[in-house]
Image: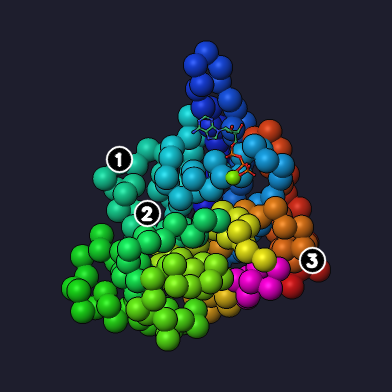
Amino acid sequence: MYQLRGVTKQYRRGKDTVDALAGVDLTIGDGDRLVIQGPTGGGKSTLLQMLGGLDRPTAGSIELDGVDLAKLPEARLTKFRAESIGFVFQSFNLIPTLNAQENVETALVPLGLKAADRRERAAQALNSVGLGERLGHLPSEMSGGQQQRVAIARALVKNPKVLLADEPTGNLDESMRDEIMDVLETMWKELGLTFIMVTHDSSIARRAPRLVTIRKGRITITENSKAV
Ligand SMILES: Nc1ncnc2c1ncn2[C@@H]1O[C@H](COP(=O)(O)OP(=O)(O)OP(=O)(O)O)[C@@H](O)[C@H]1O
Ligand SMILES: [Mg+2]
């Protein structure tokens, strides 16, 4: 369970400071599915980075299962990210010179698995997102939707506790968007993940059971009983 209390994040630019997060209090239960939306520059990506331990808040605490990520020493934070957090980004972020299987394997390198186990688990993860026939393909040899599936396999191959996605369908056309949302929701259900996603897409936001809207670093929470 995540427990955020008074989370603020200030970025300094020369003499100016930007309040990207201005005192966020939020609880997210294990296995929850949460959608974050709001205007550009509102603080969505900043919040996701705090939840994933990619950056630290200026003030406040971000507890995951009672451990405050804001205070964790750098080495433990790195280990925590490698083991517990899967990230999916708008721009896929695949390594162009590695094939699908090798891209997925990169997530397992910090976990110290043997090469044969890495290959096997990467193949399984690609199978589970419907890319079992594409293990040897380079990113340039795949469609956008397929590349994003590889990125999802890479995020999930380590069996993370939490999946964080920052506009995962932002670079895709409508049919691929639906395809990727189906994959993500299936994974969420099957793996019991906590799934937190930033989106600009109001049709996705409407389907979310719990919606966090961020404007100027402040959140409002909407519960939606009609969510599917
Ligand atoms: N590394 C940084 N240095 C300085 N300012 C930053 C940095 N990252 C973000 N900001 C500022 O913090 C605010 C929140 O940015 P953030 O990226 O979280 O917004 P966002 O809601 O994700 O926007 P978008 O929808 O455009 O992705 C913005 O004003 C942005 O300019
Ligand atoms: Mg953003």
Label 1 to label 3, Cα distance in Å? 40 Å
Residue 56: where, in percent of width, then height?
Answer: 44, 37
Residues drawn in magenta:
174-182
Q: Amino acid at mark 1?
A: Pro
Q: Nearer the viewer, residue 27 or 154?
A: 154
Q: Amino acid at mark 2?
A: Arg
Which residue is at 53% across, 31% downward?
A: 9
Residue tagged 2: 81
**Mark found first going from the N terminus, 3 or 2:** 2
Label 3 to label 2, Cα distance in Å? 32 Å
Residue tagged 3: 225
Q: Tell whether position 61 is magenta.
A: no
Circle number at residue 194: none
Count numbered badges in the picture: 3
Return the residue found at the far right.
226
The answer to whether marks 3 and 2 mark residues whose Cβ atoms lie closer than 8 Å is no
Of circles 2 and 1, the one toward us is: 2
Residue tagged 1: 73
Residue 71: where, in percent of width, then height?
Answer: 37, 38
Label 1 SS = loop
Return the residue found at the far left.
114
